[in-house]
Amino acid sequence: MKMIRFLKSMSRTVHEEHHDQLVKHKTDHDQYHEGSACPSSLTVWRKSLVISCNGFTVIDSGGNLVYRVDNYSRRPEEITLMDGSGIPVHTMRRCKTLRLVDSWFVYEGEAGDHHCRTSSKSSKKPICSVRKHVNILHSNPNVPAHVFRGSSDKGYAYMIEGSYAHRSCKVLDESRKVVAEIKRKEASKGGISFGHEVFVLVVQPGFDPGFAMALVLLLDQMCS
């Protein structure tokens, strides 16, 4: 398939330019969970492999498909992040509340019945909630969102800092340690420019790359 060949070529180009920063890194999903001591670097392409569908395609440095999103729309009520074989990794559901703040629940795998703060019907509890940062009195455009544990909104577990629109932002934990980072892919060798459609997701050891990709999808909803 021409698209797969392009992805592999694109992945090699992206990771060659990050070689000095990611020497001897293990990049695919299985190796990451085996305890790699170096960052995991993934190439994110804002395009589905399914013809006529919007979505995301995520590949490792070897050109292997590790995550995908198909049938992606501008304001969906639900987004499913799948692994390369199409098995759900995370499901994200928009929370319908009276609040004007864009808020989502993130579930492991498939979500089951609908869940929201205004409903007790749920076959599965969310692992976290992600909320767009909006504060009229203390507005900070450099903090687009916060991540809270479970369905709580008391004390964030992670803060996202930077600009997703410019493909330059970081996920920080409570101690302000960077656990994941989105980096823009500048013009590559041969004069090809990827713009904002292709970027790099760098995930630090100990942080789930699948969860990091779920945050990317929510940032795309909140900030695009």
Image (cartoon, rainbow, N blue to C red):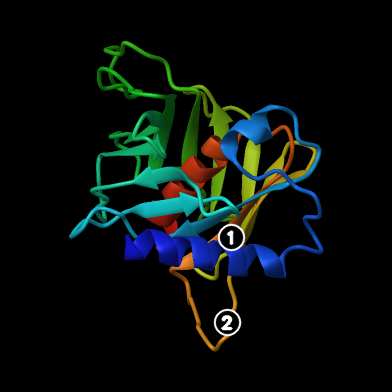
Q: CA distance from mark 2 to mark 1?
A: 13 Å
Residue 211: which quarter of the image? Answer: top right
Q: Is residue 218 visible?
A: yes
Q: Position of residue 69 (x, y in %)?
A: 34, 46
| Residue type pointed to by label 2 | Ala
Farthest bottom residue in view: 191
* Secondary structure beneath label 1: strand
Q: Where residue 13 appears, x then y in whole percent?
A: 60, 70
Q: Which mark is residue 133?
A: none
Q: Which residue is mark 1?
A: 200
Q: Quadrant of the C terminus?
A: bottom left
Which one is earlier in the sequence, the residue at label 2 or at label 1? 2
Q: Position of residue 144 (x, y in %)?
A: 54, 54
Local packing at callout 1 (Cα closer than 10 Å; few below 14, some 14-19, many 20+) is: many
Q: Quadrant of residue 1?
A: bottom left
The residue depicted at 26 percent of the width and 22 percent of the height is 114
Depth check: 223 or 137 in front? Answer: 223
- Residue in the picture at 26% in, 12% down: 121
Instruction: Decide which of 195, 96 is in the foreground and name it.
Output: 195
* Rendered view: 157 above or below 142: above
Residue closest to the eye, 101 or 104: 104
Q: Secondary structure at mark 2?
A: loop
Residue to which mark 2 is pinned: 187
Of residue 50 and residue 56, the one placed in the foreground of this image is 50
